[in-house]
Amino acid sequence: MLFNPKSANGKFRIPNSILSIAAAIEGKYEWAIVDGNCESDPLDKILSYLQTGEYKYLGFTVMPGPQAKQSIPFSKAIKEQFPDTKMIWGGYFPSNHPKVILDSGWVDFIINGPGDRAFPALIEALENDTPFEFIRNLIYKAGSEIIKNAKDDLLDQDSLPSLPYDKLNEFYPISTYLGKTYLGERSVAYHSSIGCPFTCSFCAVVPIYEARWKGKSAQKIYNDVKYIKDKWGADAIEFHDNNFFVSEKRTVEFAKLIKPEKMTWWGMARIDTMDKFSDASLALIREAGCKIIFFGAESGNNLILEQLDKGGTQTGNQIIKFAERLKKFDIIPEYSFVLGTPAPTQKQVQAQIDFEIDFIRQVKAVNPRTEIILYTYSPVATEGSELFKQVQSTGFKFPQTLEDWISPAWENFDMRKNPLTPWLTPEMIDQIRNFETVLNGAYPTVTDIRLGFLKRQLIKLSAKLRYRVNLYKYPYEIKLLQKVWKYRQPEIQGF
């Protein structure tokens, strides 16, 4: 039984992570899938499968936030009713917090990274009662000790079986997953690579992939996307890779292949990587349908970029210049910024927040179409990183029990909106959120397709004066409009 917990309200996307596990066991073991995004009562659906007596193993993919909110109580309920069932979690939440998860007693094993080899190997070992101590990418508990097996090499992605879209279609129609977005009428989510070759200390996938990256070939990506287009009518692609644009050569090859298909697409990149792309490559990428690209700008302060271990060659000056450069190619840069990093004094934290707000305004001045995504720094348990050492020195601690992770306060932490960090005061959080409200009012995101022309003009009118004179406090009139019109925030809800 493979379970994809609910990740967003009203947003259905092909569950690529859990479907890759299905692909790994296809032809070896019978499997069924339950998608929490598509079920009104997913726990009841899981229990109805288990009551048949045909399922011994459950695989959950778990991100912090909404997915943990379902996974934690569901695992507890399942273990109480079916104690002999083996519960296996994957995803970066269990990989980064194995002790609190395994100590709960509800989860038996954690897949630490890709499960293409580890998951079927574990099932085989459990089925045949053979040792699992040498299965790579596995974390488990032996007595009171947490055992982390060695990491596996990243596999050649073209060698992996294609995802079983047709079998998924038997459980949930693929058309359900092709939603209307800013990109197109029928957008498909796709993973073309795993990992990232950088070690940013605020990124939760770094401890899992350890600066490694492997991508599918341009031809393989094209073949998969073309199959979904031809069979189910997809007309746009969301590449959910951590870093789609690592290779200029691969990107250009894919752009040439996809261009005749007239599909629009989006992906994630690094500014210093794409700034090395030639003008010809950037022009081709846009001609081939790439409309908008997400970039982790993080900070305009070079010292903060160093503190975040951003790596590479990115600088504040480059962030601004690259936003300006993309204007001539008609590619919208979507910049994320992380505010509220730790500092020795609250005065320094406040100065950093003020600096970033001013810097974001500079980015908007050179390219008003730049989409701005604001996050508040939430610590990541990256062992050995200097930033995490700074965090620990402040007395910050993660929840000590698994159930504490789904308390309202920690859910806000997981969404990187209101973290419980000791160096941030409520006033600082309010300043960040109020600036975000005014910014989103003055420059409503283009990705909110439900916000029509008239609504855009009205919300701009209510926010522009505030933005012009740097008046961010108490933006109640903008908040009211955003609430009534259900303004969509891409960082929480996607497109």
Image: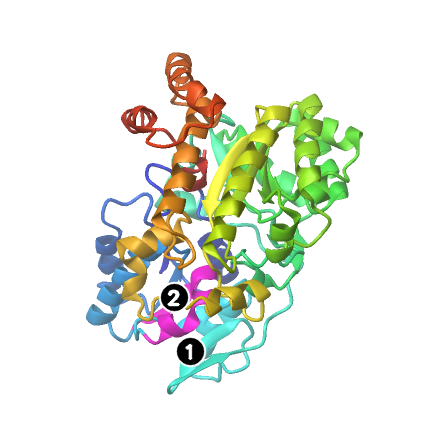
Callout 1 amino acid: Leu
User: Disc 1 to disc 2, how far (Cα)?
Assistant: 32 Å
Whole-percent x, y for residue 412 in the image: 34, 50
Q: Secondary structure at mark 1?
A: helix
Q: Position of residue 186 (x, y in %)?
A: 47, 29
Q: Is residue 94 visible?
A: yes
Magenta residues, start to end: 85-103
Question: Dividing the picture into quarters, in which one does residue 103 lie?
Answer: bottom left
Q: Which residue carries the number 1 mark?
A: 126
Q: Please state which amino acid type lies under the numbered disc 2.
A: Phe
Q: Which mark is residue 398?
A: 2
Disc on the earlier residue, 1 or 2: 1
Quarter holding residue 256 = top right
Q: Say few, some or many: other residues with alpha carbon within 10 Å of mark 2 (under 14 / 14 to 19 / 20 or more).
A: some
Q: How is the image coloured?
A: rainbow
Q: Nearer the viewer, residue 370 or 213?
A: 370
Judging depth in this view, the residue of 3 and 170 nearest the camera is: 3
Q: Is residue 7 left or right of residue 50?
A: right
Q: Along the line of sight, which residue is nearer the eye, 236 or 295?
A: 295
Residue 83, given in percent of the width and then of the height, sits at: 25, 74
From the viewer's perspective, tell me whether residue 350 is left or right of residue 218.
Answer: left
Q: Is residue 12 visible?
A: no
Q: Quadrant of the N terminus?
A: bottom left
Tell me which residue sits at (47%, 84%) in the image: 130
Residue at x-position 21% and y-position 54%: 44
Q: Secondary structure at mark 2?
A: loop
Q: Is residue 95 magenta?
A: yes
